[in-house]
Structures are given as C-alpha cells and as structure tokens.
Amino acid sequence: MTLHRLREMHAAGEKIAVLTCYDAAFAQVLDAAGVDVLLVGDSLGSVLQGHATTLSVSVEDMVYHTACVARGNRGAWIVADMPFGSYQESPELALRNAVRLMQAGAQMVKLEGGGWTVPAERFLVERGIPVCGHLGFTPQSVHALGGYRVQGRGDSGAQLLRTQTAELADAGADMVVLEMVPAALAREVTQETRLLVIGIGAGAGCSGQVLVMHDMLGLTRGKPPRFVRNFAAGAADIEGAVRQYVADVKAGRFPDDAVHGF
Ligand code: KIV
C-alpha cells in the first residue's frame, strides 16, 4: 500500500479499512484479510498494558510495537501514534521521535490535537515524514476534555473542527482521524477537505473507518462504545471477523449512522 494508492481509492469512492495492530502475528492476519492501513495506536496502553488511559505509553513502547507490526506486515500502510509527551514540547522533539518510529517501520506518524500541533506537523512534513492528524475526541487529552465526550457539537464546536482540519491540510498532512464527532459534520468535513478522513465514531460519510482491533473482536470487557460492532460474533475465526469488517466498511454497511453514529 502507498499513499498514492490510498488517494486513488478515495478518489474512486472506495472506503479505506483501518484497524489498530500491535504485533507481528496480528499484522499477518489483518494484512492477509485485506486491511488497508494498520494503526499502531497508543491505545496499546489500554488494551495491551491494562492502563485506564493512553498517557503512560512511551516512545520506546511505540518503537517496539511498530517494529513488531512491520515484521509481520507485507502490504498494508503502517501508521504509528506519537505518544503523549513525544511532540508537545517542540517541532524538533517531534522530529527526533518521529524518526525513531519511521526507522522502526512506520510509514506515517499520527499526532493528536489541533492548532498548536500545526508547527510540529509542518516541520515533519517538510522533512519527508507523512503526517496523520487526530481531531475531535483526542484520548491523550481525556482529562482536559472532561472524559469520553462527543466533540464538534454546536456551531462553535463544528467551526473549530473545520478550522483545525483546514490548518492540518495547510500544514501538508495527508490523513486525519476524526474521533467521536457528529456524523453529519464529519461527512461535510470529508467533502470539504483534501485530507483522507478516517472516522471512529464519526459516521459513514468519512473516507474510511478505524476501530481498535480488540474492540471489534469482542475482547474488551465492559460495555463497548456506541460506535463499536463485535465482528467476531458469528465469525468462524479471527481472519473471518476481520474480512467481514473490511467487506462491511467497503460496502458501506459499517458503520450504520442510526446505530453507531452521534
Ligand atoms: O490509539 C488508537 O488506537 C487510536 C484510535 C482510537 C484511532 O488513535
């Protein structure tokens, strides 16, 4: 997979199927099942390490898991999360840490937040590192945002999301994850921007969809978020569940805004 191919898919109206992935074994399965993009998410702090948030994930953790995924993967595009504290201080610090992730096998790095992240994002893009933004609900800011809350509501919330998306595109980024924003707003933003928009709890109108793999395999205890579907229910095996996810994303059957949207 290449960035060029992802853009072609979007231009042709083909949805991009993304899942989180943290190791070589699952990278092999997800890649074989047709997932376009593997996101080495800092959600590994919750799903692998058992923390309540992603805040304790280190650059070393991300480098280790990115290298594991890269060894198992053959064809999918690999995006690695820049963890909390690895890019907030300065564009130079962001570059040093992004280089480590790229050397571990990432093809793109993802930074959370809008506005203040733009200098670092521009700095990375100018130095040849593809960038994905992450707007709407940003888990590294969970305490500042007052918990797991839908973002972009109301006129001012919608305007803020539009402005942040435009600034990210202007900085030269290629992709953005929109998390927990109203489906109608995400659809409009996707139509307005040149960025590839990957939604999670952002409705069916995005260029593609992402879920945390453990959530869509039904491995997460407790009540799942509204935007999750358990694809393991009824599947013969893990690869079958992932194939169903890819097929449903591409056919527009997942997500269903009436069930999974805000
Ligand atoms: O870390 C992660 O898994 C993510 C997804 C929630 C998009 O950023």
Image: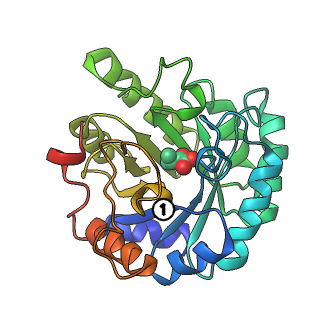
Looking at this view, is 255 or 10 the one in front? 255
Q: Mark 1 points at which residue?
A: 19
User: Quick one: which residue is furthest to the left in this view?
Assistant: 258
**Position of 73 compared to 31: left or right?**
right
**Does residue 81 lie above or below 118 as drawn?**
below
**Does residue 6 lie above or below 152 as drawn?**
below
Q: Quadrant of the N terminus?
A: bottom right
Residue 114 appears in the rendering? yes
Residue 77, given in percent of the width and then of the height, sits at 57, 69
**Position of 86 compared to 202: left or right?**
right
Residue 34 appears in the rendering? no
**Callout 1 crowding tier (Cα within 10 Å): few <14, some 14–19, many ≥20:** many
Kind of element beneath mark 1: strand
Residue 171 lies in quadrant: top right
Q: Quadrant of the C terminus?
A: top left
At 37% from the left edge and 56% from the top edge, which residue is drawn? Answer: 209
**Does residue 189 lie above or below 60 as drawn?**
above
Looking at this view, is 161 or 202 the one in front? 202
Looking at this view, is 197 or 231 the one in front? 231
- The amino acid type found where label 1 is placed reads Leu
User: Quick one: which residue is furthest to the front in this view?
Assistant: 221
Residue 172, given in percent of the width and then of the height, sits at 57, 45
**Position of 159 compared to 109: left or right?**
left
